[in-house]
Image: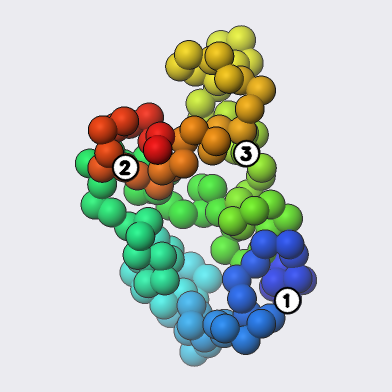
Amino acid sequence: MKGQMQKLSHHPVVEGKVSCNDCHNVHGTTSHGQIKGDNLNQLCYKCHQDKRGPFMWEHAPVEENCSTCHKPHGSNHAALLVKPTPLLCKDCHEGPHGQVRAAGKFVGRACLNCHSKIHGSNGPAGKDFTR
C-alpha cells in the first residue's frame, strides 16, 4: 500500500492530511478491505459528498462502485483513475467500429472536455453529462 501512496495521484496520506485509520478499521470488520462503512461507495462519500447525488441523471458506474473507475490508494493517472480517459470511457462506451458511441465526431479528443459532469447531472443536458 505504501508504494501506491507514492504514485502521481494518491490520497493525501503522505502529506498527513488523512491517515489509513480514516478509511480502514485496524481491528477488523466484516467488510472487504477492513473499510469503515457499509460499502466502498458509502466510505468514499464521507469526503466526496458532491459525487453522491441524488442526481436526475445518474451515471451507472457511480451507483455501482467507485472502484469501477478509481483506484482506492494510488494511480499514475489523474483523479486516481484506473486508466486514462478516453480509454476508461471506451471500456463501456465503445461502438462497433472502435469509435465512441453517440455522434462520434470528436473521437480523438478527451471525453472530459465536454462530459465534465461525469458523476451525475441535474442539468438540462441530461444524460449526456455535459456542462
Judging depth in this view, the residue of 65 and 122 nearest the camera is 122
Task: Measure the alpha-carbon separation of dots 2 and 3.
Answer: 19 Å
User: On the rendered structure, is 54 left or right of 114?
Assistant: left
Which residue sits furthest front? 131
Q: Is residue 76 above or below residue 17?
A: above
Q: Is residue 7 left or right of residue 95?
A: right
Dot 2 alpha-carbon crowd within 10 angstroms: few under 14, some 14 to 19, many 20 or more: many
Please state which amino acid type lies under the numbered disc 1.
Lys
The 10 Å Cα crowd at callout 1, few under 14, some 14 to 19, many 20 or more, is few
Read off the residue under disc 1. 2
Mark 3 surroundings within 10 Å by alpha-carbon count, few (fewer than 14), some (14 through 19), many (20 or more): some
- Specify the amino acid type for callout 3: Thr
Residue at 51% in and 26% down: 93
Q: Which mark is residue 85?
A: 3
Task: Kindly identify which residue carries mark 2.
Answer: 121
For numbered disc 2, what is the local secondary structure? strand
Q: Is mark 1 in CB contact (under 8 Å) with mark 2?
A: no
Q: In the rendering, at what x and y percent does residue 16 appear?
A: 62, 86
Q: Secondary structure at mark 1?
A: loop
Q: Looking at the image, which residue is at 73% across and 55% down?
A: 76
16 or 62, which is in the foreground? 16
Compared across the picture, whether 59 is left or right of 77 comes to left
Which dot, 1 or 3, sits closer to the camera?
3
Position of 60 relative to 75 (above/below):
above
SS under mark 3 = loop
User: Looking at the figure, which quarter contains the N terminus?
Assistant: bottom right
- How far from the left and from the top, in percent, is residue 102? 45, 16
Residue 53 image point, x, y percent: 28, 54
Q: Residue at x 54, y 48 (%)?
A: 69
Quadrant in the rendering for residue 9: bottom right
Which of the two discs, 1 and 3, labels the residue nearer the N terminus?
1
